Image: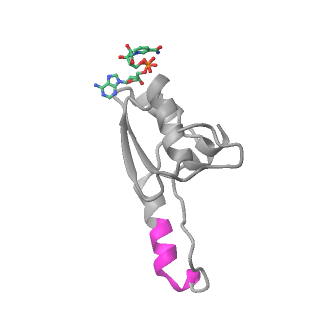
Amino acid sequence: MTDQPHGPSLRAAGLAALVTGGAAGIGAAVVRLLHQEGARVHVADVDQDAYVRTIPLGRRGAPHEVARAALYLASGESAYVTGTNLVVDGGIAAGRQAT
Ligand SMILES: NC(=O)c1ccc[n+]([C@@H]2O[C@H](COP(=O)([O-])OP(=O)(O)OC[C@H]3O[C@@H](n4cnc5c(N)ncnc54)[C@H](O)[C@@H]3O)[C@@H](O)[C@H]2O)c1
């Protein structure tokens, strides 16, 4: 996998990855690379403070924040919303794209 000057190659599109020790160092670099390649990346780390620092909003999401997004999608309020993903992650995915 190499840097792509015109965006991600998406060679890992559709794949899910679990990166242990992904909050810092080599693990964090692997997380960014897998994300750039299109994978859905889950991070596990024993250092919870380090993990939280990787979240652009600086905190974990609360269950009700995810529930509200699901409620919106299930309600008539989203009747004209089609074919999109609603990302509820405190900016993690956007932050990884920017780095
Ligand atoms: N940085 C290098 O140049 C280099 C070179 C060769 C080998 N290594 C080895 O690679 C490994 C990672 O290096 P690094 O520089 O990224 O270290 P790092 O300390 O920057 O990051 C390691 C991360 O792993 C997490 N972690 C530790 N134990 C864990 C566990 N049991 N489960 C989940 N997460 C855990 C830590 O909390 C930390 O966030 C180390 O074993 C290091 O010795 C590093």
Whether residue 59 is visible to the viewer of this picture, yes or no, is no
Task: Please name the residue shown 53% across and 31% down the image.
Answer: 53
Residue 19 lies in quadrant = top left
Q: Position of residue 91 (x, y in %)?
A: 59, 48
Out of 47 and 67, give the one closest to the viewer: 47
Figure check: 14 above or below 56: below
State which image quarter holds ligand 1. top left
Q: Position of residue 13 (x, y in %)?
A: 48, 56
Out of 20 and 2, give the one closest to the viewer: 2
Out of 97 and 80, give the one closest to the viewer: 97
Whether residue 66 is visible to the viewer of this picture, yes or no, is yes
Task: Please name the residue shown 48% across and 38% down the image.
Answer: 31
Q: Horizontally, is 12 left or right of 77 in the view?
A: left
The number of numbered badges drawn on the structure is: 0
Q: How is the image coloured?
A: one colour
Residue 78 lies in quadrant = bottom right
Q: Horizontally, is 94 left or right of 68 in the view?
A: right
Queried whether the magenta region covers residue 14, the answer comes back as: no
Task: Please name the residue shown 67% across and 42% down the image.
Answer: 98
Furthest residue to the right? 6
* Residue range highlighted in magenta: 68-78
